[in-house]
Image (spheres, rainbow, N blue to C red):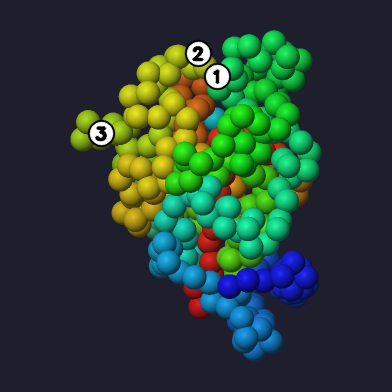
Amino acid sequence: MYLSRFYYTLIVLNIIKHTSSDCGCQLNRKSECTKEDSSHKYKQEFNKKHSDNNVFNAFNKQNMVLIEGATFEMGTNKPVFKSDFEGPARNVTLKSFYLDMYEVSNQNFKDFIDKSGYVTEAETFGDSFMFDLFIPEEEKEQYKDFRAIQAPWWVKVNGVDWKHPEGLKSSIAERLNHPVVHVSWNDATEFCKFQGKRLPTEAEWEMACRGGLKQKLYPWGNKLNAKDRHWANIWQGEFPNHNTREDGFVSTAPVDQYFPNKFNLYNMAGNVWEWTQDSWLNNDDEKVKKGGSYMCHESYCWRYRCAARSQNTKDSTAGNLGFRCAGDAL
Ligand SMILES: *[C@@H]1O[C@H](CO)[C@@H](O)[C@H](O)[C@H]1NC(C)=O
Ligand SMILES: [Ca+2]
Ligand SMILES: [Ca+2]
């Protein structure tokens, strides 16, 4: 289905206009909404108005799973990073929702760009954060002043964006089934909206990650290499200088790599961090990301646990940060 930019803008405006319902809950936070009737009414009205398109609540459910509403224990009483507010464990009740089985791939994102003409924030800014390991030796010197102070392996490099994940000479041609990276929270939100979807809330993401298991570290259980297998794309070896590639990948892996969890979701832990729509500590400029990435090693970033969480500003982009979309279940 092709939508002109103008039409697309109208739809987005409509969604924004309708999100501030009187119960104060956001579109995607139905679970926290006490006035269920009003959000239901809103959906019907919207559907009537837009019955000639399939943008809202009638999104394509191919490659999505329906996750039944339930109560689950979110967070942990054994936080690894206390300053990330991983705890305490608490019961959270969610309504049913849909979630993408896979992280959004480069192919998915390319299709979106081709249809919408959307320009990402990294393209607008002209740079993005790239992992030092992937910068050619001869170019390292020129970027020595563009390193993140507390994480010098992050380098801000010109010309890096979703199409050029490792600089102007790189391309996504050989990794169309890898997760899209260098996309900001704003970009991810636009992508999901365009499909009639939305980003998952942090609670939805974590419930999905746990896949019905109670208080386990990982989507598959408590043992990192259960059954002598790799279950996620993380870092083996000594970070940040040596990656032994035991799980098969130094950088991103295909979005359908490794076994899915019990909900049939792939790569919830590891591969790329995933944006959620929640704000970090009520600061709306910063958003929660979940799942850790191929750069995470237990020694410094044991964040490929379901309870783990971190944050970035809404316009941040990096080579290990992507997303997947969710959708309301009527
Ligand atoms: C969540 O609810 C279950 C069932 O009522 C209870 O056994 C459990 O202790 C609760 N967990 C927390 C963290 O309150
Ligand atoms: Ca790896
Ligand atoms: Ca992931």
Q: CA distance from mark 3 to mark 2?
A: 24 Å
> What label does residue 133 carry, if any?
1
- Crowding at dot 1, Cα within 10 Å, few <14 / some 14-19 / many 20+, comes out as some
Q: Which of pointers 3 and 1 lies earlier in the amino acid sequence?
A: 1
* Side of 74 relative to 148 (left or right): left
Q: CA distance from mark 2 to mark 1?
A: 7 Å
Please say if 36 is above or below 177. Answer: below
* Side of 181 relative to 224 (left or right): right
**Residue shown at the point (64%, 23%) measured from the top left:** 154
Disc 3 is placed on an element classified as loop
State which quadrant residue 4 falls in: bottom right
Disc 2 is placed on an element classified as loop
- Crowding at dot 2, Cα within 10 Å, few <14 / some 14-19 / many 20+, comes out as few
State which quadrant residue 231 falls in: top left
Please say if 91 is above or below 236. Answer: below
Disc 3 CB within 8 Å of nearest ligand 2 atom: no
Q: CA distance from mark 3 to mark 1?
A: 26 Å
Q: Which kind of residue does numbered mark 2 sit on? A: Asn
Residue 287 appears anywhere in the view? no
Asked if labels 1 and 3 touch by Cβ distance under 8 angstroms, the answer is: no
Q: Which of pointers 2 and 1 lies earlier in the amino acid sequence?
A: 1
> What label does residue 229 carry, if any?
3
> What label does residue 241 carry, if any?
2
Residue 42 appears anywhere in the view? yes
Q: Which kind of residue does numbered mark 3 sit on? A: Arg
> What label does residue 203 carry, if any?
none
